[in-house]
Image (cartoon, rainbow, N blue to C red):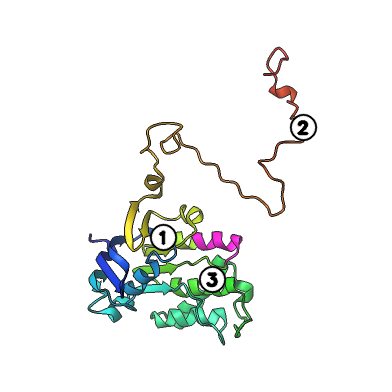
């Protein structure tokens, strides 16, 4: 595919007798956000490590924006920005400095890197911590460190952005901002590979989902297709177009919505029929 910024074909990686990736194939096109889902140990981070050249596959191929990541891992790394699952080592730096350094390493001018850092801080709502220095075990919360690491990956335009569990430790309000920023990266033309467990939140920003199970791709497609929309036997079966899903977000310590009411509700006059009788 001419617009693919990531092409993985029949990728296999073993650790002794354990097959971490078993003939994995996937594509990410420019402008698309692809979610990579799977249980712990499904092989997601192993796959990411090979894409960015930290691990060499036993078989298969990886191309990042035309570069062969197996034969030329350094060339592939120049075309991809990674937010790793582990926290970025920020101790001794402020978020502003860390983001600007990441931009400068990507070839941005000092002025452009400074402006991009400020814009990302505003977008993610971390401005009040922008000049607070991270210290070992303190200075910045885990959520601010995670958002700073995302900004470091997003500060400069690159063909491919890989985000490995970017919302870990991030509060609900700023998670929404982060998801909006992920979607913006795709809309701006980058291909985004998003590794996440947060399916419900990520669903609104991804164009395609790829599901790994024990190292193999077991499903791939749009969120709607993987939910079964339009594929079931008909209305009311929970999988067809007539399926309905209700999601509730409850406050800790609040009332149990499944508990029976203390007394039967009394219908209002507006709910009664034209002759005054209620159904």
Q: Is residue 215 left or right of residue 152?
A: left
Q: Which residue is mark 2?
A: 263
Q: Which residue is mark 1?
A: 38
Callout 3–callout 1 Cβ contact below 8 Å: no
The residue under the point 57% across, 82% down is 94
Front one among 207 and 211 = 211
Q: Nearer the viewer, mark 3 or mark 1?
A: 1
Front one among 233 and 114 = 233
- Mark 1–mark 2 Cα distance, whole angstroms, equals 45 Å
Q: Quadrant of the C terminus?
A: top right
Earlier residue among tags 3 and 2: 3
- Mark 3–mark 2 Cα distance, whole angstroms, equals 48 Å
The residue under the point 31% across, 75% down is 16
Earlier residue among tags 3 and 1: 1
Q: Position of residue 130 (x, y in %)?
A: 59, 77
- Say what secondary structure mark 1 lies in: strand
Which residue is farthest front? 17
Which residue is farthest top? 275
Q: Which segment did they paint magenta?
A: 170-179
Whether residue 74 is in magenta: the answer is no
- Mark 3–mark 1 Cα distance, whole angstroms, equals 23 Å
Residue 147, numbered circle: 3
């Amino acid at each position: 595919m001419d617009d693919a910024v990531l092409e993985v074909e029949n990728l296999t990686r073993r650790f002794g007798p354990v097959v971490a990736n078993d003939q994995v194939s996937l594509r990410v096109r420019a402008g698309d956000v692809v979610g990579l889902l799977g249980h712990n140990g499904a092989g997601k981070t192993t796959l990411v490590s090979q894409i960015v050249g930290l691990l060499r596959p036993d078989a298969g191929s990886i191309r990042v924006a035309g570069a062969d990541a197996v034969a030329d891992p350094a060339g592939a790394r120049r075309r991809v920005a990674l937010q790793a699952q582990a926290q970025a080592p920020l101790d001794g730096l402020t978020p502003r400095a860390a983001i600007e350094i990441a931009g400068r390493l990507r070839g941005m001018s000092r002025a452009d890197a400074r402006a991009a850092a400020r814009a990302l801080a505003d977008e993610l709502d971390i401005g009040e911590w922008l000049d607070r220095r991270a210290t070992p075990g303190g200075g910045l919360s885990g959520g601010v460190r995670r958002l700073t690491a995302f900004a470091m990956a997003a500060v400069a335009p690159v063909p491919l952005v890989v985000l490995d569990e970017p919302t870990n430790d991030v509060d609900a309000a700023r998670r929404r901002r982060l998801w909006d920023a992920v979607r913006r990266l795709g809309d701006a033309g980058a291909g985004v590979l998003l590794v996440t467990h947060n399916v419900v939140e990520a669903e609104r920003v991804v164009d395609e989902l790829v599901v790994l199970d024990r190292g193999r791709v077991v499903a791939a497609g749009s969120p709607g297709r993987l939910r079964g929309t339009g594929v079931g036997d008909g209305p009311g079966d929970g999988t067809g177009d007539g399926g309905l899903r209700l999601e509730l977000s409850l406050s800790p310590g609040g009332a149990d919505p499944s508990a029976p009411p203390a007394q039967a509700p009394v219908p209002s006059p507006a709910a009664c029929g034209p002759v005054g009788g209620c159904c």
